[in-house]
Image (tube, rainbow, N blue to C red):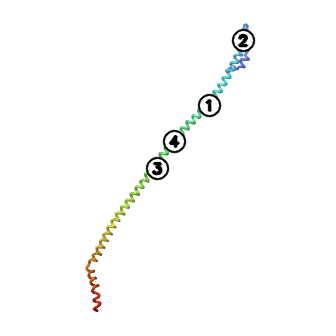
């Protein structure tokens, strides 16, 4: 166990023949006590400073560790957001492609139906035109037939026959 200033102060030496000068030894011991007390106080102050600095170092180490963890969490969150955005953009693109395909297919189907309807209308107009032509020809033939002439003559002869009766 280390000596305390009190141990040094209370130390008594045995006296011998031709021993040391007692006043000189006491004066030296007083100086040693003062120096030893100063050293003990300095040691205590340094120990407190070391303790305080160790606590601060621990505090800042904890902050550093927390910040590092926060940075890692933020990086992971950013990566997750990026992955989610990529996934969502792929889904949006797929949905848009599906809609585009559907719209194109509907447009093609509608254009096919319209083309079929146009063909059908062309056929119907040809049939109508041919029938109309045939009707007009029949009407022209009827107008140009001798029956008209005969009817015209019949009407002219009728009044004479009526007068003869």
Q: Badges 4 and 1: C-beta atoms under 8 Å apart?
A: no
- Crowd around label 4: few <14 · some 14–19 · many ≥20 (10 Å): few
Q: Of callouts 3 and 1, which one flags the residue occurring earlier in the amino acid sequence?
A: 1
- Kindly identify which numbered label has been placed on residue 92: 3
Figure quadrant of residue 69: top right
The answer for how far apart the CA atoms under marks 2 and 1 are is: 47 Å
Q: CA distance from mark 3 to mark 2?
A: 99 Å
**What is the residue that sits farthest to the left in this orientation?**
146
Task: Give the SS element for disc 1.
Answer: helix
Of the pair 101 and 36, the residue shown nearer to us: 101
* Quadrant including the C terminus: bottom left
Q: Residues within 10 Å of mark 1 (few under 14, many from 20)?
A: few
3 and 1 marks in contact (CB < 8 Å)? no
Distance from Cα at disc 4 to Cα at disc 1? 32 Å
Mark 4 vs 1, N-terminal side: 1
The residue located at (30%, 71%) in the rendering is 133
* Label 2 or label 4, whichever comes before in sequence order: 2
Label 1 sits on residue: 56
Secondary structure category for the residue under label 3: helix
* Secondary element type, mark 2: helix
Q: Is residue 137 above or below residue 113?
A: below
Q: Residue at x 33, y 67 (%)?
A: 125
Q: Mark 2 = which residue?
A: 24
Count neighbours of disc 3 (C-alpha within 10 A) and say few if under 14, some if 14 to 19, many if 20 or more.
few
Neighbor class of circle 2 (other Cα within 10 Å; few <14, some 14-19, many 20+) is few
Mark number displayed over residue 78: 4
- Circles 2 and 1 in contact, beta carbons < 8 Å: no
């Amino acid at each position: 166990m280390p000596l305390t200033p009190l141990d040094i102060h209370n130390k008594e030496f045995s006296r011998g023949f031709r021993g040391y000068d007692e006043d000189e030894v006491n004066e030296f011991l007083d100086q040693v006590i003062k120096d030893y007390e100063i050293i003990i106080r300095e040691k205590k102050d340094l120990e407190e400073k070391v303790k305080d600095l160790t606590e601060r170092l621990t505090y800042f180490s904890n902050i550093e560790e927390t910040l590092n963890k926060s940075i890692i969490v933020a990086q992971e969150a950013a990566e997750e957001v990026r992955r989610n955005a990529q996934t969502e953009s792929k889904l949006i693109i797929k949905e848009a492609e599906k809609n585009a395909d559907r719209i194109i297919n509907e447009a093609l189907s509608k254009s096919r139906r319209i083309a079929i309807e146009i063909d059908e209308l062309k056929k119907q107009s040809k049939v109508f035109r041919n029938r109309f032509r045939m009707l007009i020809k029949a009407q022209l033939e009827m107008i140009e037939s001798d029956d008209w002439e005969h009817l015209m003559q019949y009407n002219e002869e009728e009044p004479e026959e009526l007068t003869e009766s």
